[in-house]
Each structure stands twice: as C-alpha cells, then as structure tokens.
Image: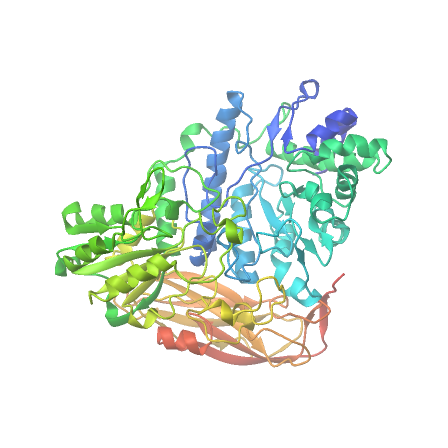
Amino acid sequence: MDTVKGKARQLVSEMTTEEKIHQMLHAAPAIPRLGIPKYNWWNEALHGVARAGVATVFPQAIGMAASFNKELIGKIADIISTEGRAKHHEYARRGDFGMYKGLTFWSPNINIFRDPRWGRGHETYGEDPYLTTELALAFIKGIQGGDENHLKAAACAKHFAVHSGPEATRFDFDSVVSKKDMYETYLPAFEACVKEGKVEAIMGAYNAINGEPCCCNDWLLNELLRKKWGFEGHVVSDCGAIHNLHAFHKITTSHPESVARSVKNGCDLNCGQAYLFLHQALEEGLIEEHELDASVERLMCARIKLGILEEESSPYSGIPYTENDKAEHSAVNLIMARESIVLLKNDKKLLPINAEKIQKIAVIGPNADSREVLKGNYCGTSSDYVTVLQGLKDLLGKERVAYAPGCGLLQMSLETLEPEEIPLGDRLTEAAVAAEMSDIVVLCLGLDPSVEGENGDAFNAEAGGDKKDLELPECQRKLLKTISALGKPMVVLLFSGSALSVDTETPNLDAVVQCFYSGATGGTAIAEMLFGKYSPSGRLPVTFYRSVDQLPPFEEYSMENRTYKYFTGEPLFPFGYGLSYTNFTYGEIKLDKAEYKTGESVGCTVTLKNTGEYDGYEVTESYIASDITEFRLPQYELKGFEKVFLARGEEKEIHFTFTPEALSVINMEGDRLVMPANYTLYIGSGQPDEKTEELSGTTVKSTQFTLSGETLVLDTAI
C-alpha cells in the first residue's frame, strides 16, 4: 500500500492545478504525458453490470437478501466483477471510456430499509443491520477480489449515511436522528464495510444529518469515517449533491463555497460538474491546493490498484469479453432466483401443484408476462428473459396455459384511442374466461420499478418514487376480487421490491408467494417452484405490515415502532419468515456453559433434521434478547444465520459463536457496551414471535445464559 501511495503522490506532484481539478470529476479526462487515460468513474452493479449492454441480470438486491445466502451473494459479486472486467477491457481497447464502462461500481446500497414506503428500498438488503452487514461484506469481497495489492473492481458502499427517503425531498431533507439510533441501526453496516470489507469507496448521501449535509459533513467524513474507522479509500458525492449545498440545503451561498467546503470536509470525487468551481474557490482563498492534492492522491491510488493507468498492470486484465453473459453465469442466476422466492401462505398444501392432476392452468395479471419485474432498477440487459408466462409454457407446453393480463399495472384498460387517449374497456371478462376454463389460477400482481424507485427514475412522480400506502393498485384489487369470486384454486404471486399488504384478501387466498424482482431467469424459477421441482427457502428481509397506519410518519428517523426490533403491532408477515415444502426439526440448544464473563464469546450447537418429504434448504436464524432495563433496547436482534441443505431424513449439527461484539448493546449516548445481565438465545426457522409461530406452525427453540462481571465499553460514540 505504501508503494501505491508513493506512486499516487508522485503522479499528483506532476499535475497542474487544472489537471488535478478535472481528475476530481466523475468524467475524468486523459493526461497523456503522465500515462493517465480518460476514465469515467460512474458505474452501477447492484445485481449485475448495469446500463452497459448485455450482462447477467440477477435478482434485485432485496430478492438476493431474501436468500439469506451470503456465500451465493459473494459468488454472484465475483461474476459481476468478471463481467465488468470483460466489458471494460474490450470497450477501452476500442477507445470507449463512457459512463457505465469503468471498474468503479457504485454498489452496494447498504441503507437500512426502515420504512416500506421508500421507493429505493429494493436496492438494499432489507431492514436489519446484521443481515445487511453480512450480505454487504460478501458482496464487497466478491467485487473487489482476494488480491491484497490489486482490485478486481472497486465496490462503493452507499449512501452514507442515515438515508432511506423520502425521495421527493431528498435534496434538502434533514435526517434528525439520535445517537442511539445512529450507532445501533444506521452506521454498523458502513463501519463493517470499511473495517472488515476494506471497501474502496463510500458515497455520501443527499440528505443532511442533524442539520449538516452528508457530502460536506466534517464529523461524518473526517472524524468518523477516516479518523475513527481508518478508511483509506475515496469518497464520492451522490450525483449533484455538491450543487445542492447552496441550491437546496442553503448552507452555502455559491458554487465556490460549496465545493471548497466539500473537499475540505472529505469528499474527493464529484459526481457532476460542480468541482470545476474549485478554480474560483482557489482564487478566492476558500481552499488551498494541498487540500486538493489529498483527494486526487486517493483517486490515483484507486486507479493504480485497478491497474488502469498506462504504467500499471493487473492480474485481472486478461479476462476476455467471452466471459460476459456466460451460460455458467445464467445457471448461478437461476439458483439465486430460486432462493429469493418466499412462500408466504400455502393453505391446504395447494403448492406444489401436481402436473398430472391438472389439465390447464390460467396465468393472469399485469405481471404475468412482464420483463420489468424481472429486471428491477439499475440493471443490465439480459440476452434471455423468462417471464412467468414463458416459464410455465416451457414447463407445461403452450396448450396447457391460458393467459389473460386482466388489467394494466395501474389502470383497468390496456389500450387507448390516440390521440385522445380514451380508455377502451377492461380485460376482466377475458381473465374470468381464462380462469373458468382452467383447473388452477396463477395470479401475477404487484408493482414494478416504474412505480417504486428513485426520484426521477420511477414514474410515480406524485410521491417522488415512494409509495403512499402498501395496497395493491385499485385495478389489481378489482381483478383479484373478480377472480377470487370464481372459487378456483388460486396462487397469488406478488412482485415488488417492498412490503405489500393484502391484509383483507389474505384470509381468502389459498397460496401467496413473494417473488420480489426476480432476475432474468425468474420465470423459470417460479414455474419450477410452483410444480415442486425444488422446495422454496427464501425468507423476508423486511417486515410486511398490514397498513402504514401501523407505522410512524415516513419522515421520522427514530426507530421507535419500526422494523421487527421495535415494532409493537401485529405484522401481516414477519421479518425472517418463509415457508417450505418440507419440514425441519430442531433439537435443544446446547451451550458451552450457562454462565460467561463479559468479554467472553458464547458458543452453542443445535441439531437440525429434515423430517419432511422434500430435500431442501433451511435458513437457521438466531436471535438474542436480554433483561437489561437501563435504556431502550430491541425486543431481540438477529445475531446469526446459516443456510443449510439437507436431504430427506438428513440431520446436521449447526454451530454458532457469539462474540462480545454480537452480545453488545447500544446505550442512549451511542456507546457500545457488553453488560452483565441475563440473556435469552433463540434458534429456529424465524423470529421468536407469536405471528411466526402461528403462520409456520413451528416453535423456536430457546435457552438462557448469564453474563457476569464488569460492564465493558467496546466503543464510545463521537
């Protein structure tokens, strides 16, 4: 690393002031005399190489989170960086250094999905800091590779920090947050990505935290990120965020003031053009040139480690274009699509469907033949999309599948009369006919990224890409009511990147499946699941509430009554919940001992057995609660999970070790403590809550242990 820093420092010492400034823009020009080629830092890879042509399109991040499979996510990230390398080298060879063609991926999005209304929540790994941390670490390591001296590609943890809506006011929103919630919920994943993941980049968020915008926040970027956590990579602004400092946040009065404040306070790279005003800031004495040098040196370090300067090489530079969009990558994609599907309800064991007992299946709904629900946002272009309709045709044959869209995504009609755009009727009758002539109905409902997503991307402009409620669109509720009234056995497939409520309809539905945005092979995975080619194993990475009436106002960032940790109401479907076609039985939890000293790790084992009729995966979840009453604490917290494949009749011993960090709590001042107290450990197929037990018919195992001794302070908030 010292050699890299030395090379970077030497390069920067030979640059003119103007050259330094231009290297701090996302679209950085070449400096031929120094062997620095043109480079565009802006690239995306949430679930595949995005927006640069054909690539493997994996399930959206929230769907991958539902797999609870960090090893698989790491494998997928490695594939993404391979495809990114393949594309970059071929494009560069042809002189194409455009946007989305570099090796600096602005992924993963590790913001906490604290409220289901947030439109961008499907870019995240869900509502839990521990789950988010574990999956983000796997993703970052897969993207960046295992070479200590070289980066396969550069990952970027975003958006730092305390960022999860509302989208419509994100440019000037102030996230007011307590130190407890900051250190307990919003910061842990970022800290782990820096300290354990060695993530190369951090992206600053649009919002302010307690009055100070993130991209010029000295406490956030300098004191916490660099000094306390030891971050050595580079910080990039969210796009346009520097301009927003005076245009929206109003904490500065001009571009020169905004850019000077941002660079001084730790933002190295400007996604945008605002840093061109650094010339004026220097002239006005708002910043000194050596402050630019520090930022440009960090940027040159990244490019050296990537091996994308003329004098540099990389062990990854030989990856050919033929490695992009390979059949082997599609096979991994199908595995993840299968593991991302969550079976929420299966009354009377309607699923799996026995193909020999039905003649015809009706596939109905606006998402039955939709590519948009496969793609998610920030996606590439697949060479082969398989919708639900196509997947079922492939499995059963076209003659056994009756199709009717029933309605549009947001309106009853699918046609208009140009130019007046007069609606030309609905498709409800057609849908009813298809259902009546079939033995079973698969109803494909939900949303797509055009109505939940980023402000400016999603067309849901009224809410800026956010949702106002959790309900299905009115036209889809009408379709659901119409088809339900026919009395046919029916499976409802929900496509969305967030929690939807079918609260009033759920008691009358035979089977409900959450599919998220399931990637290019989603239709194949869903068809296979419906007909029992494998047993579903996904778990919800977010709580499905009954209504937004159960939640605090969207704009409030306190964690009171939010997520499974603090929610006091009854959910529709709980975090961590998901059904299977087989049964898993847990033995009693065996602790190493019953009493430990604060500072010791707690070890345990539990025996898991597949006692059902299918081979399958089980997600074993462990939660910990304590009797500490000195300050507000979660009801319990996820502290470990293991995904295990067991054949019918097979059993396996599962081991968990809980370090002092895992046993620690955050007090109201934001300090991390390990306290003497009585603790309860829960291990099973989900949370230790009544709703999970009611829905799954299983009881989570539990045991108690004690920590004794002095309170240990693991970390002190700043």
The residue nearer to you, when weighing 116 against 235, is: 116
The answer to whether residue 351 is seen in the rendering is no
- Above or below: residue 4 compared with residue 692: above
View extreme (right): residue: 285
Give the x, y percent position of residue 364: 26, 54
Q: Is residue 39 above or below residue 502?
A: above
Q: Quadrant of residue 560?
A: bottom right
Location of the N terminus by quadrant is top right
- Please state the total of marks drawn on the protein image: 0
The residue drawn where x is 24% and y is 53% is 363
Q: Where does residue 583 sit, x and y in percent of width and height?
A: 31, 70
Q: Quadrant of the C terminus?
A: bottom right
Q: Is residue 659 left or right of residue 389?
A: right
User: Residue 492 at x, y = what percent?
Assistant: 30, 61
Viewer-closest of 383 and 254: 254
Q: Is residue 330 left or right of residue 2?
A: left
